[in-house]
Image: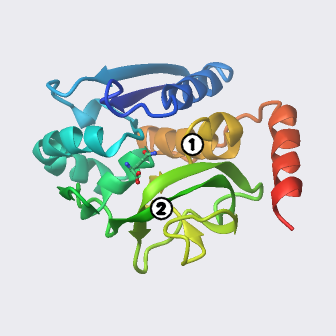
Amino acid sequence: MKITIGHLYPDLLNLYGDRGNIQCMMKRCQWRGIEAETLEFKLEDEVDFSKLDIVLLGGGSDREQMIVCKRLQQIQKNFKDYVEDGGVVIAVCGGYQLLGDYYQTDEGRMEGLHLVKLHTEQKPGRLISNIVLKSDLFDMPVVGFENHGGRTDIGDNQPFGKVLYGSGNNGESGYEGIVYKHVIGTYLHGPLLPKNPQVCDWLIEKALERKYGEEIKLQPLDDQEEKEANAYIVNRFVK
Ligand code: GLN
């Protein structure tokens, strides 16, 4: 078996080293004897979504998001078809905001991809914190770090998780991120997948199931260290 990961615009959307999330997906495939390759796309490159099993859209500053959002309009239709067909997407922070209808900043409005029904508005003050979530997708809590000025409203969509500690989508709803089909959008950046192997494996599993048309049960790996680190964070922050 083989999966191909598409990394969209890593030269612009790579805040807090989203490449580490790519390495984690590659490694957890290879450890199981699943072949994995990553294709990096620059702004001017054509993206052939039919060749991709997982797409990563990383975080970026408002300035970089503004550059990327213009190009995203041109690939919107193909991207949308991919998502509706069950294509796997992991979108982090700036990339998460761009999945939605728009991101309104003090400087202007960025048109989003309209892949999921959400919108984001910049408000004074940034939401910066460690964060812990309970997601319906996993038993183990999801841990991470958030740093965003945008506040996201996901309407009636399924959130990625309930906030046990931290701010989440807007500091008010009590929820973080979004799940739509096989798309996860989240404010948790930096080493999201290395810290949360359960999230990484969910993405790999869904990608393989879509590609090979059968139910996939990934071979378990030794995640003892990740589990201990996770328990440490949860005990430290969740009262
Ligand atoms: N520019 C966005 C914000 O501040 C996203 C930042 C990020 O990707 N960390 O809300």
Secondary structure state at the residue bearing disc 1: helix
Q: Nearer the viewer, residue 160 or 181?
A: 160
- Say above or below: 23 vs 210: above
- Numbered disc 2: secondary structure: strand
Can I make out residue 87 in this image? no
- The C terminus, quarter of image: bottom right
Q: Which residue is drawn at 21% across and 31% down?
A: 48
Task: Determine which quarter of the picture holds residue 58.
Answer: top left
At horizontal 45% and vertical 34% (from top left) the residue drawn is 15
- Picture coordinates of residue 105 (x, y %)? 27, 59
Give the camera-side residue of 88 and 213.
88
Residue under label 1: 205
Residue pointed to by mark 2 = 125
Q: How crowded is mark 2: few (under 14 residues within 10 Å), some or many (20 or more)?
A: few
In front of the other: 23 or 54: 23
Residue 199, x across and y down, in percent = 62, 46
